[in-house]
């Protein structure tokens, strides 16, 4: 063989060897990765070749599957009353993946979870058609509808929890959207999603979990808890050291109350009843920033919360003295999610014990056998039982004879706190209306609620937690109690 032919033969041999190595690398080393790759069309076709399992509320499916037209993806997701449930379920789209429970519980819903391995294996022998499992939620349908209808056409959010277990009973966010409109993979679906993303009202924003607001005067219950827990005051009916006027520390600015309120040296009970800024601003300053942060941490602030859907962290910041005083009345850099304030109300109602919020009660196999049942879990001790009961007395006074009377429910003990949070630079925009509350029956407290309303259409003077938010909380609490 002459020299040029020999070189060509060696080169061809190297190419064949490289091809063999590459082929074996793809078939054996990267086989699992490529088999499950998101751009592997066969994986996607198989994913949508069978009906997805359902998300369950009150024993009934709030989701379903329908056959698609003109697509090699056979089934797509649909929702029953999508805008009502979108803040809970999220979306599942052939083109845009999934979010929230639809994403986190995807393995169960598609039938691909390791927890369903036995069912998949058995179906190979029985010839039974593959199907997904179900996710049973903790949601209360009546409470969810009361929350959604109460918000109406206003921007806002509602979260209701079972204080004794942490179960999420309602989680509403408005304006909302219908996930069904972009569940497929057509241009129509793409256009529908783009329209939602461009909407200035942000209907796809989950305001209950992913928006943080200044909590306003609802935060005064946390400041009161800090005062009791740190021994600054122990008698809720004794006078406090609260001069009027009171000047912010390191400043010449006097902290104002709303109107001519009886706030000078007011007791904790009276200060919460009429919502004295001066009393709680001074308490926050007397305790100092470090102790306030320690108390807020016990209620769940300063870290993300998983329900299992992630909620943004609520922040009580490290700050200077004047800003710490303002944060103590729910202003300055104090920011919180509606979920967090529901957790505050729930911990107080549950005698100081804060339970981990959760939305998934059970996971079921396709044959409806339970393969997972959630066990309630204590998250922290926010305050002592004795001090929590004192704070309950204070919050019940707010509803019985204070700013929260519109949350009263005949025959039921209700505790609450109103809030009207400043919004915008120098309070230039319309404020947020807040209300947090709990209801108690003979068997304990079955529900705690947080409501925030952004009502851009209301007159500025008409915006208040007691006027806008308290009636919504009342309807949600009543729905839970009536369903027991």
Image: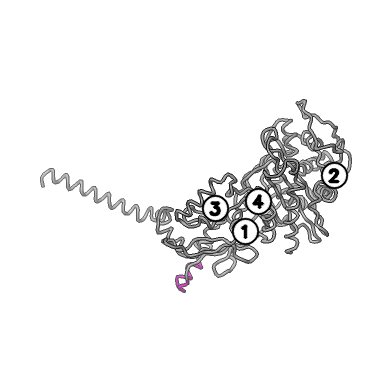
Label placed on residue 360: 1
Residue 217 is situated, as x and y percent measured from the top left of the image, at 76, 42
Disc marking residue 269:
2
**Furthest-left residue in this view:** 2
Residue 334 appears in which quarter of the rendering? Answer: top right
**Quarter the C terminus occupies:** bottom right
Count neighbours of disc 1 (C-alpha within 10 A) and say few if under 14, some if 14 to 19, many if 20 or more. Answer: many
**Does 184 sit above or below residue 258?**
below
SS under mark 4: loop
Tell me the magenta residue range.
118-128
First in sequence: mark 1 vs mark 3: 3
Whole-number angstrom distance, CA of label 1 to CA of label 3:
15 Å
Secondary structure under tag 3 reads loop
Q: Which of pointers 1 and 3 indicates the residue nearer the eye?
A: 3
Q: Which residue is drawn at 58% across and 56% down?
A: 89
Spatial CA distance of label 4 from label 2 is: 35 Å
Q: Distance between the residues labelled 1 and 4?
A: 28 Å
N-terminal of the two: label 4 or label 3? 3
Queried whether the magenta region covers residue 216, the answer comes back as: no
Q: Which residue is drawn at 51% across and 52% down?
A: 192
For label 3, the residue is 99
- Measuring from the top left, give residue 469's x and y in whole percent: 73, 49
């Amino acid at each position: 063989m002459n020299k040029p032919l020999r070189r060509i033969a060696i080169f061809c041999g190297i190419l064949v060897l490289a091809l063999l190595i590459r082929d074996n690398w793809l078939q054996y080393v990267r086989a699992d990765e490529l088999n499950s790759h998101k751009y592997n069309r066969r994986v996607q076709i198989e994913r949508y070749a069978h009906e997805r399992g359902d998300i369950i509320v009150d024993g009934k499916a709030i989701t379903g599957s329908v056959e698609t037209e003109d697509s090699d993806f056979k089934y797509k997701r649909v929702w029953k009353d999508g805008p009502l449930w979108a803040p809970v379920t999220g979306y599942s789209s052939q083109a845009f993946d999934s979010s929230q429970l639809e994403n986190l519980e995807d393995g169960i819903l598609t039938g691909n979870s390791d927890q369903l391995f036995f069912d998949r294996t058995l179906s190979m022998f029985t010839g039974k058609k593959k199907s997904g499992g179900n996710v049973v939620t903790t949601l209360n349908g009546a409470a969810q509808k009361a929350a959604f209808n109460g918000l109406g056409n206003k921007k806002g959010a509602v979260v209701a929890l079972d204080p004794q277990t942490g179960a999420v009973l309602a989680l509403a966010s408005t304006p909302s959207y219908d996930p069904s409109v972009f569940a497929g993979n057509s241009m129509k679906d793409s256009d529908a999603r783009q329209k939602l993303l461009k909407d200035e009202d942000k209907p796809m924003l989950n305001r209950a979990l992913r928006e943080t607001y200044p909590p306003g005067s609802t935060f005064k219950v946390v400041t009161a808890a800090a005062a009791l827990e740190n021994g600054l005051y122990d008698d809720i009916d004794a006078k406090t050291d609260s001069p009027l006027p009171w000047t912010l520390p390191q400043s010449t600015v006097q902290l104002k109350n709303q109107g001519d309120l009886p706030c000078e040296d007011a007791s904790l009970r009276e200060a919460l009843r009429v919502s004295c800024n001066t009393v709680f601003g001074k308490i926050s300053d007397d305790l100092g920033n470090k102790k306030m942060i320690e108390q807020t941490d016990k209620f769940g602030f300063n870290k993300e919360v998983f329900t299992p859907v992630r909620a943004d962290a609520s922040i009580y910041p490290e700050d200077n003295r004047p800003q710490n005083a303002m944060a103590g009345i729910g202003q300055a850099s104090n920011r919180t999610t509606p979920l967090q304030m529901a957790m505050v109300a729930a911990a107080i109602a549950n005698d100081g014990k804060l339970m981990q919020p959760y939305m998934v009660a059970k996971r079921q196999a396709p044959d409806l056998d339970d393969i997972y049942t959630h066990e309630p879990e204590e998250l922290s001790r926010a305050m002592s039982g004795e001090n929590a009961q004192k704070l309950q007395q204070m919050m019940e006074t707010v509803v019985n004879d204070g700013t929260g009377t519109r949350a009263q429910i005949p025959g039921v003990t209700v505790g609450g706190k109103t809030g009207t949070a400043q919004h915008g630079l120098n309070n230039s925009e319309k404020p947020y209306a807040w209300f947090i509350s709990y209801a108690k029956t003979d068997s304990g407290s079955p529900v705690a609620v947080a409501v925030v309303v952004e009502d851009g259409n209301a007159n500025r003077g008409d915006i208040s937690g007691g006027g806008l938010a308290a009636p919504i909380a009342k309807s949600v609490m009543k729905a839970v109690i009536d369903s027991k």
